[in-house]
Amino acid sequence: MTTRRREHQESDLPIGLAKPARRALAAAGYWRLEQLAKLSEAELKQLHGIGPKALDLLRRALSAMDK
């Protein structure tokens, strides 16, 4: 199994996250919600492929993770 496939299988990013957003996060090395918890929204917005819908979905997933 390749590293990329293994990392993709270990990802806990929300299922409804669009492919451009997934690609943007993967290209930046982010596969897990815990990694994103350390970033600001401004940092996420800078990634090409992360738009308002992706930010909202990630925000809700991170909020649910804290509960």
Image (cartoon, rainbow, N blue to C red):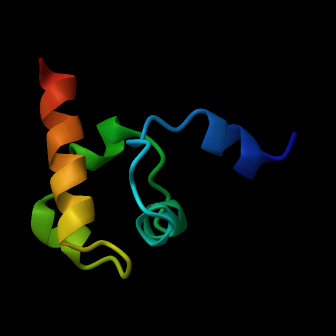
Screen quadrant of the N terminus: top right
Screen quadrant of the C terminus: top left
- Residue drawn at x 22%, y 25% is 65
Q: Quadrant of residue 37?
A: top left
x%, y% of residue 12? 45, 34
Q: On the rendered structure, is 27 left or right of 1?
A: left
Q: Quadrant of residue 39?
A: bottom left
How many marks can you see? Answer: 0
- Residue drawn at x 74%, y 46% is 5
What residue occupies the far right of the structure in this picture? Answer: 1
- Residue drawn at x 84%, y 46% is 2
x%, y% of residue 33? 33, 39
x%, y% of residue 26? 52, 61
Say if 52 sits above or below 3 in the image. below
Q: On the rendered structure, is 9 left or right of 46?
A: right
What residue occupies the far top of the structure in this picture? Answer: 67
Q: On the rendered structure, is 60 left or right of 31?
A: left
x%, y% of residue 40? 13, 59
Say if 21 sits above or below 14 in the image. below
